[in-house]
Image (tube, helix red, strand yellow):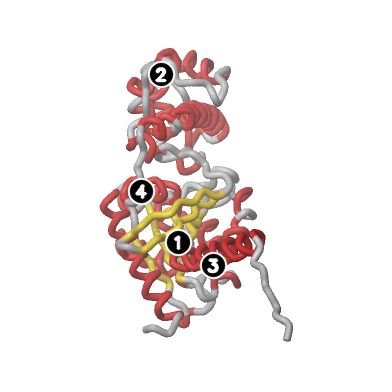
Amino acid sequence: MGSFCSTVTDEDKQSVFVDGEIATARTVDKRIKKLLLLGAGGSGKSTFFKQLQTIHGPGFDDKDRLSFQKHIYHQIVEQMKRLISRADEFSEDFPEEYGDCKIGAAANEAAEYFDLLRDDAPVTEEVAQKVEILWADSGIKNAFAKRAKFGVTDSTGYFFDEIKRISAPNYIPSFEDVLFCRHRTTGVVDKIFVIKGTQLRVFDVGGQRAERKKWIHCFEHVTGVIFVAALSGYDEVMYEEETENVMHDSLNLFGEVCNNQWFTETSMILFLNKKDLFEEKIRLIPLTECFADYDGDGSHDDGLMFIKQKFAERNEKGEQRQIYIHITCATDQRNVERVFNDVQHIVIEDSLDAGGLL
């Protein structure tokens, strides 16, 4: 009888090694829970991402914070130019409602200076002086008070107040500066965070309308979706389209996400964010600015319940699908830590339930 000999080549060994590496990678990947941070631009979802990097990640060293310097400069210049433009335009076109937004004579020179300034100009001491003059002007202050109609970011006032420190030659942004910086996310950014022993891979996706078409690439094998909506947006116009209401856009977008075919078995978590701004605003501006059908008592709690219900109504599955709702403040680190501990619990419970282990 003859004998059959099999020779294992180096190529075969390499193939076995690669197959083993792929199998290991798949096993590790299955242990990592994939979370999408979705929501309209300006909802605060990127602020949550920054907080997670501080609480459960490496944080921001000087080099990291320095990378935000140009974004902060841009926000200050671009938003001041926007305020000047809207103050001039609205005070002339609608003097009865916006006449108090007219820029005073003492600030005209500073306003003209900004007209010639590039959006990407650094904030020098000279620029800071012009900002101080304009920020002291009653017309600009009144325009900022009505910023909901102009698409001006809430945090911009913080940077105007801090303009002297920011204009220093050796300026390195503080963590608070980083947190308040309104830098529009483009594309997809992701990091892995370990929360209570669970690895969560969190994806922060651009919320502007032009960015939403990119979301589809993140939809596969998602464990949970965190949708962020700004409670304070009920009287605000969108940055991209000043004729559209922020809250209406968030409700429509939530409906699309919640009922998306990719997410039928996915944990759906809703963060109603900016509760601090909502508490201040609801005392002064009625919810009927956004919802003509609101007939409640106008209180904070009643308004909050009404908004919750509006989002819940977008869930086409009704009681067959639970929406986990949290009232949040992304700039409050304790609040963020607490709600993400809850998120970790929700994700684990739902994963066990889906696997028939509960």
Q: Disc 4 marks which residue?
A: 57
Name the residue rendered at 54%, 35% in the picture: 94
Question: Foreground mark, 1 or 3?
Answer: 3
Name the residue rendered at 44%, 67% in the picture: 31
Q: What numbered label is drawn on residue 128? A: 2
Could you tell me the amino acid type at mark 3? Ala
Q: What numbered label is drawn on residue 185? A: none
In space, the residues marked 1 and 3 are separated at their CA atoms by: 29 Å
The answer to which image quadrant residue 132 occupies is top left
Could you tell me the amino acid type at mark 1? Ile
Of the numbered discs 1 and 3, the one sitting upstream in the chain is 3
Of the numbered discs 3 and 2, the one sitting upstream in the chain is 3
CB atoms at circles 1 and 2 under 8 Å apart? no
Could you tell me the amino acid type at mark 4? Gly
| Crowding near the residue tagged with mark 4, few <14, some 14–19, many ≥20 C-alpha atoms within 10 Å | some
In space, the residues marked 1 and 4 are separated at their CA atoms by: 19 Å
